Image: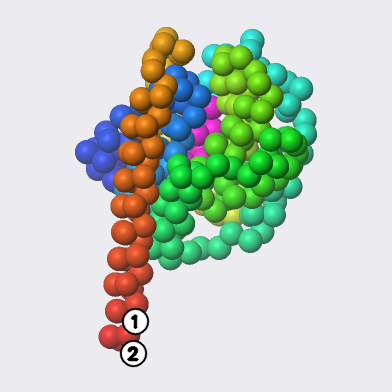
Amino acid sequence: MDALHAGLGWPIAATLLAVSFASSFITVAFGIGGGAVMLAVLATLLPAAAIVPVHGLVQLGSNTGRAALLLKYMRLDLLGGFSVGAVAGILLGGSLVVQLHAGWIQIGVGGFILWSVLSKPPEFLRRSGMVTGVFSSFLTMFFGGTGPFVATYVKAQKFERHSYVATHAMLMTVQHLLKTIAFGFLGFAFSAWAGLIALLVAFGVLGTFAGRMVLTRIDEKHFGLALNITLTLLALRLIYAGGNALFIARSVQEGAG
């Protein structure tokens, strides 16, 4: 049974399962935001080296389920250019990614989430699927939560809501699949996390079904405000925890010296 919670313990595993359900619900019901919530919680509860790879595989499962559920709404004409760019971005990011101190990863993820809340993705991402694929896939190797960048491109196509959610899920499935393959080649031991990841994906699929039932029925304005406040608080906590970890590590080094 320990394999099912990857050694984290059932209280932490149960929290992650609830967040997986909620994050998929949020993404389907509101179109964006669930991946950032999942990333922020994973960055708080998982070892630093596991944050981005585990998040990527969980999001692969969630986006695959979401894409399958809304298959008839997909716009396949956007797939080619984005996929070519995503391959290039993953290869470039994979060649540069290094094992960082846990504190830097927490600060980086926290800062990335905070920036996604307070700023808008670059305007150039609206114009080219290939450029969006390169840019977002490069960043995803380091920070994970690049859904807002892909969303910027998909939103610019002015699809109706179901097509937007389905197409965004399709493109994110491609990106997370490539990222998972890359981390496998880089030596990340996915097998140690397989049981927990399977449960997280299953709860994410349940959240997808629940989210579809309320798609377009919820007040997006008030929910969006609550979501941004929550993400901001989680991001600030990550930045604080990362800074504190770096301070302690430096103090230990100075003491040893």
Q: Amino acid at mark 2?
A: Gly
| Residue in the image at 53% along x and 20% along y | 66
The picture places residue 214, in percent across and down from the top left corner, at 41, 12
| Residue in the image at 34% along x and 39% along y | 229
The picture places residue 29, in percent across and down from the top left corner, at 44, 19
Name the residue nearer the viewer: 109 or 95.
109
Residue 253's mark? 1
- Assess whether mark 2 and mark 1 are in contact (beta carbons under 8 angstroms): yes
What is the span of residues highlighted in magenta in the rendered image?
54-63
Dominant secondary-structure state across the stretch colored magenta: helix
Using the image, determine if residue 98 lies above or below residue 202.
below
Q: Which residue is mark 2?
A: 257
Residue 106's mark? none
Q: Amino acid at mark 1?
A: Gln
Helix, strand or loop at label 2? It is loop
Using the image, determine if residue 39 lies above or below residue 248.
above
| Residue in the image at 27% along x and 33% along y | 14
The picture places residue 140, in percent across and down from the top left corner, at 57, 47
| Residue in the image at 66% along x and 41% along y | 123
Using the image, determine if residue 236 lies above or below residue 170.
below
Q: Label 2 neighbourhood size at 10 Å, few (<14), some (14-19), many (20+)?
A: few
Name the residue nearer the viewer: 220 or 139.
220
Image quarter hosting the N terminus = top left
